[in-house]
Image: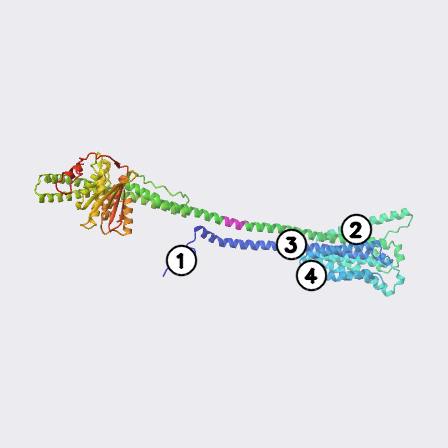
Amino acid sequence: MSKSRPLTGNWRVARRLQAILLIPVLVALGLGGVRVKNSIGTLQDANDAVRVAELVQAANAYASDAINERDVSVIPLLQGKRDAPAVVAARKVTDADAKAFDTAVARVPKTAGLIRRIELVRAGEKLLPAVRADAFTAKVSGVQTEESYHAVQHPLMEISNELGFGSNNQASFGRTLYAISLTQAAESLVRAIGTHLLVENRDALTEDELKTQLGSFSSYAYLEQVGLQEYAGAGTAGDMTRLRTALADAQKKGAQQTAKAAEEAKAAGQTFVTPPTLPKMITAIAAGTPTEQLAAQGITPESFFAASALSFDAYRGIEVRLTDTALADARSIAADARVEAIVNGSLALGAVLAAVLLAAWVARSMSRGMRRLSASAIEIAEQRLPAVITQLSLAVPGQVDTKVTPIPITTTDEIGEVARAFDHVHREAVRLAAQQAALRGNVNTIFTNLSRRNQSLIERQLALITDLEEREADPEQLSNLFRLDHLATRVRRNGENLLVLGGERPTQQWDHPLPLVDVIRAAASEVEQYERIELEGIPEAEIHGRAVTDLVHLLAELLENATSFSSPRSAVRVTAARLPDTRIMVEIHDKGIGLVPEDFALINHKLANPPTADADVYQSMGLFVVGRLADRHGIRVQLRPAARESGTTSLVMLPGTITWRNGTESDADTLALAAFRARATPGPAALLADG
């Protein structure tokens, strides 16, 4: 049952870091999104408040101009002048306000409160054409005409209650604006009804109609005072200061108008009576005083309308200022909300982007450090450490620089700690390799000393055997001496194998070239079953003296291997051929059982790359020695399956650096060839003993 692997088991470090940072990034993104959403919501509310303030501004202008239309139309309509310029101009202003109001309505948010109030305005607007047509006619009495405009003005005035977004007290702000609008409306009714009473012929009225007009006049005068009290209760100290200032300016302007009228009357030679204050005018008119007596007091339609218009304009100015202030505040809040939304959005986006970039930077830096660590570790494992080991195996251990170059990571984090751990492992590996190289050097020294001692004894033994062979005449004893000579030669070659294992070169070297055929014969003479070896087609070529001893040793090992692993009744053929590039190919053919392809591949690899001498060398010492000897002189040795029959073919490629072609057989009486020719009976001889 296999263990379950974690989901992130095969993820790279950068991906894991990104996954870890994904959660806080998502949380930050969510919180930032909520904040941005709130800012956008606030901005939307502020923009809606701006549009509501614009609607209230248009509605108040519409309402004020509508009741002003009514007031300026009283005298012309009562006089039957229905197309008087003042009436036409006032109605144009009202109609223009209606269009501006419609434009504002199209932009306001569709809330339930606004929709309900706008529907009330539309209902009143439907009555306006009939009100204009029937004003001051027999169909509608005077007071009914003046009060009929209320159906349009009052719904418009009530829209003010939708103001107040961003103020400290929304209800108080709307209440203040509603109170001043109510005061203005009451003042307008007082002005309209008072002017009506001063113009209309009271004798044509019934007593009830006159009482109704006087009662309405008094009621609206009282309503004006109620509106002022409501304004005082809802407004701030600053609102009251502005109202008192506006009324004081109205009184001052009224005094200026009175003084100017007096001067004009005096200039015209007319008698001018200074009218009383507006409150006194209202009291006198409400008392039902006849128009003649009122005129004697200076209370005329013109003086009363002018005085009342000043109060109306003062209230209108306060109303306009409140709506302008509300609109300005709403726009300021909208601008602030817009800036806040942009800032919050930028901060949220910047925070997320910074988090992503930080995560990417950290992940990249860690990943880069890990890649550098991995690359350095692979370089140590595959190049630097093997190179040092190779140098230690080929050279004297003390002469090899075993200093370890640290991995180029200087950080103190976990990656740096792992790098230092790798450096420590690297140093320990090099130290152990140096110790192993020193140990191998000691072993090689032992091999060399033992080999050289044995070589001295074997040389003496061979000299003694040769001397006995020369004196012996008995063929049987001579044959025994030949076999003894052969055994001694093999022992000598084994001693030379120890020298090869120890990295030493033969003590005796040829000082002049030797023909290739003699080299092959000398190698054959060292093989126990030398009589099975057949030479064919050996070209005329010579081997450099420095390579003769090693080549004889190399070929002897291959011939020994060929005769040992083939049938005793079969021959081992040795052929050679010169290649166009001056190299010579020597082939050794046997008819043994052969090898499987895997064995050929392994043996050829060892021949091309001789391993370090270790405990396994004894299992294939001959191949090891062949590989070492071939490597000394650039000789290539390969084993291949036989082409037709079973068996093995050994290929020995001699480079041009150790061979050359000679037209004549030079030094035909060399020691080796002379020894071959001098033998009366076939048998091995120590051809290179005295070389």
Provide residue 106's location: percent of width, then percent of height. Answer: 69, 57
Q: Earlier in the sequence, mark 1 or mark 3?
A: 1
**CB atoms at circles 4 and 2 under 8 Å apart?**
no
Of the numbered discs 2 and 3, the one sitting upstream in the chain is 3
Residue 608 in percent (x, y) is at: 29, 44
Q: Is residue 356 left or right of residue 313?
A: left
Residue 162's place in the image compared with 467, above or below, is: below
Q: Amino acid at mark 3?
A: Ala
Whichever of labels 4 and 3 marks the residue nearer the N terminus, that label is 3
Query: Pointer 3: what residue?
Result: 46
**Distance between mark 1 and mark 2 Cα atoms:** 91 Å
Mark 4 and mark 3 in contact? Answer it, CB < 8 Å.
no
Q: How many marks?
A: 4
Q: Label 2: which residue? A: 250
Write the start and end of the magenta stretch as one range.
350-357
Q: Which residue is mark 4?
A: 115
Q: Amino acid at mark 1?
A: Arg
Label 1 sits on a secondary structure element that is loop
Q: Please, what is the three-letter code of the amino acid marked with disc 2? A: Ala
Q: Kindly indicate the quadrant of the structure image that contains residue 582.
A: top left
Q: Quick one: label 1 or label 4, which is nearer the N terminus?
A: 1
Tell me: 563 left or right of 74.
left
Q: CA distance from mark 1 to mark 3?
A: 56 Å
Which residue position is annotated with label 1?
Answer: 5
Residue 442 lies, in percent from the top left, at: 23, 42
What element does badge 3 sit on? helix
Cα distance between the residues tagged 2 and 3: 36 Å
